[in-house]
Amino acid sequence: MGLIEFKNVSKRYKTDDGDFFALRDVSLNVDAGDFIVIRGRSGSGKSTLLNIAGTIDTFEGSYLFDGREVNGTNDAVRAGIRQKHIGFVFQEYYLINHQSVLYNVISPLLFERGMKLRDCKKAALAALERVGMKNYAKRKADTLSGGQKQRVAIARALVNKPKLLLCDEPTGALDSGTASEILGILENENRAGTTILFVTHDPSIVFENARVIEISDGRIV
Ligand SMILES: Nc1ncnc2c1ncn2[C@@H]1O[C@H](COP(=O)(O)OP(=O)(O)O)[C@@H](O)[C@H]1O
Ligand SMILES: [Mg+2]
């Protein structure tokens, strides 16, 4: 079943020298359960593609998420899709540093209407357990190492059991040993059924079961 269907998706920026295409006529199908690696040099359009897939950015063309056209929908509809179905992991973690690990992971659930705090906590602790960070629930985020922060960020992305996990160079700031631990966590989550779109410029990153797509100058090559 198609979870993501891009058809001639383009992202155009107006510049003084005319139009610049950060993404040009990208067509891409991702099935539920797929692990997709999108590889390309810096500036090739990887983050642009991921932000469109994550319903953050506007674009030209057609994007069906789980069978539903995203183009032309309003901000509230797109925010709803994100909150329900999509998790994000970034190189920079984006944790709330002065808050506890538990608070960071609970925070996406606080938007869910009608969910009891006790159930939010339960879900957050379960997500932390999946990434091996349950024992750190009470720690302040800024006392963690980079690898630990990224584990917490992954738990936060997974806490509402998204269909799609988007990863924008999540190991870019980590040493290779810590990076491979993080990659192992992502592989496990994919095996458990989560669809993953992972972008990187790093050719040394390989996954056993991933389909690799190359992107260059905004085009899939
Ligand atoms: N707001 C913007 N205005 C103009 N150009 C942009 C904007 N955002 C990104 N770009 C350009 O789009 C291209 C792709 O960017 P990006 O998707 O961030 O690349 P990557 O993630 O592969 O490094 C780059 O050339 C970048 O400079
Ligand atoms: Mg990028």
Image (spheres, rainbow, N blue to C red):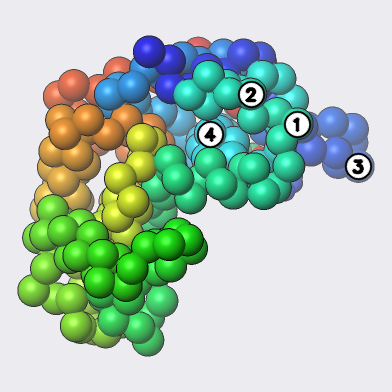
Residue at the spot 45% in from the left edge and 30% down from the top edge: 40
Q: Residues within 10 Å of mark 2 (few under 14, many from 20)?
A: few
Q: Are marks 3 and 1 in contact (CB under 8 Å)?
A: no
Q: CA distance from mark 2 to mark 4?
A: 12 Å
Q: Earlier in the sequence, mark 2 or mark 3?
A: 3
At x 32% / y 72%, what residue is drawn? 117
Vertical order, 160 against 57 (above or below) = below
- Mark 4 neighbour density, 10 Å: few (under 14) some (14–19) many (20 or more): many
Q: Quadrant of residue 208?
A: top left
Residue displayed at 79% across by 38% down: 13
Residue flagged by tag 3: what amino acid is it? Asp
Q: Which residue is tagged 4?
A: 53
Residue drawn 19% across the image and 50% down it: 182
Mark 2 lies on residue: 69
User: In the figure, is residue 87 to the left or right of 161?
Assistant: right
Mark 2 and mark 1: span between their CA atoms?
A: 8 Å
Which mark is drawn over residue 132? Answer: none
Label placed on residue 16: 3
Residue flagged by tag 2: what amino acid is it? Glu
Q: Position of residue 16 (x, y in %)?
A: 91, 42
Q: Nearer the viewer, mark 2 or mark 3?
A: 2
| Relative side of 146 to 21, left or right | left
Callout 1, which amino acid? Gly
Q: Secondary structure at mark 4?
A: helix
| Circle nearer the N terminus (2, 4) | 4
Earlier-in-chain disc, 3 versus 1: 3
Q: Position of residue 86 (x, y in %)?
A: 43, 43
